[in-house]
Image (cartoon, grey):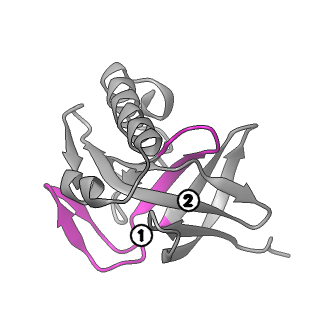
C-alpha cells in the first residue's frame, strides 16, 4: 500500500496559495525536511537554466530558516542543472504536507558556483515589516555564502543525483 501523498503548498507573502504539488519525503530532521518532486509546469528558461516538465527537484525546507533550496536535475539525462533558492518565511511542516510563504526574492546558483539574485523589484514591493525584510536579506546573504563555500545543501554539487 502506498503512503498518502505529501503535498507542498507554496503561498505568496500575503498567504495566498499560488502552487500546490505532490512530493516524496526523502529525509526528515528536527528542523528540516528533504523532498523529491517533479516539475509540473511548462518548459521555460530561467537565466540560461532550462526547466523542463518532469525535471527532478531535491528540495530542502527548514522550519528555522528563511529560505529553501532546490537542487535541479534534468528529466532525461539526470544531469545536475544547479540550485534554485527561495527566500521565504520558515516552512510549516505537518503530517501529509508543508506550507511555505515565498517572499519573491530568489537566488539561482549554477553548477560552476556562479549565481544571480532574482526578483529584487518584486521583493521590494512586498508589504513586509522591517524585521521580515531584514530576516529575508540576511537569509539571502546566508544562502549566498553557503553556496560559495559549498556548505549545507550545496555540499555536494551532485547531491541527490540518481
Q: Where is residue 114 in the image (x, y as percent from the top left)?
A: 19, 34
Name the foreground residue: 38 vs 124: 124
Q: Where is residue 28 in the image (x, y as percent from the top left)?
A: 72, 44
Neighbor class of circle 2 (other Cα within 10 Å; few <14, some 14-19, many 20+) is many
Q: Where is residue 4 in the image (x, y as percent from the top left)?
A: 78, 74
Q: Distance between the residues labelled 1 and 2?
A: 17 Å
Helix, strand or loop at mark 1: loop
Residue position marked by numbered label 1 in the rendering: 39
Q: Look at the picture and state if 29 lies above or below 75.
A: above
Q: What stretch is highlighted in magenta?
A: 38-67
Q: Look at the picture and state if 119 lies above or below 157.
A: below
Q: Does the magenta stretch include residue 114?
A: no
Say if mark 1 contacts mark 2, CB within 8 Å: no
* Image quadrant where residue 127 sits: bottom left
Residue 137 relative to residue 57: left or right: left
Seen as rendered, the residue at the extreme top is 149
Residue 7 relative to residue 113: left or right: right
The residue that appears at 41% across and 53% down in the rendered structure is: 128
Helix, strand or loop at mark 2: strand
Q: Where is residue 42 in the image (x, y as percent from the top left)?
A: 30, 80
Q: Give the quarter of the figure containing the N terminus.
A: bottom right
Neighbor class of circle 1 (other Cα within 10 Å; few <14, some 14-19, many 20+) is some
Seen as rendered, the residue at the extreme front is 130
Q: Does the magenta stretch include residue 48?
A: yes
Instruction: Name which of mark 1 and mark 2 comes first in the sequence.
Output: 1
The residue that appears at 48% across and 35% down in the rendered structure is: 153
The label number, if any, that marks residue 100 in the structure image: 2
Amino acid at each position: 500500500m502506498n503512503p498518502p501523498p505529501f503535498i507542498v503548498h507554496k503561498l505568496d507573502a500575503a498567504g495566498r496559495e499560488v502552487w500546490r504539488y505532490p512530493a516524496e519525503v526523502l529525509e526528515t530532521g528536527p528542523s528540516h525536511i528533504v523532498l523529491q518532486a517533479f516539475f509540473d509546469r511548462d518548459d521555460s528558461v530561467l537565466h540560461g537554466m532550462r526547466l523542463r516538465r518532469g525535471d527532478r527537484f531535491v528540495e530542502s525546507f527548514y522550519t528555522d530558516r528563511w529560505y529553501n533550496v532546490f537542487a535541479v536535475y534534468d528529466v532525461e539525462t539526470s544531469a545536475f542543472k544547479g540550485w534554485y533558492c527561495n527566500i521565504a518565511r520558515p516552512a510549516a511542516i505537518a503530517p501529509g504536507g508543508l506550507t511555505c510563504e515565498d517572499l519573491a526574492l530568489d537566488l539561482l546558483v549554477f553548477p560552476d558556483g556562479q549565481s544571480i539574485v532574482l526578483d529584487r523589484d518584486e521583493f521590494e514591493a512586498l508589504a513586509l515589516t522591517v524585521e521580515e525584510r531584514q530576516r529575508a536579506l540576511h537569509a539571502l546573504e546566508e544562502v549566498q555564502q553557503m553556496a560559495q563555500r559549498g556548505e549545507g545543501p550545496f555540499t555536494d554539487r551532485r547531491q541527490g543525483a540518481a
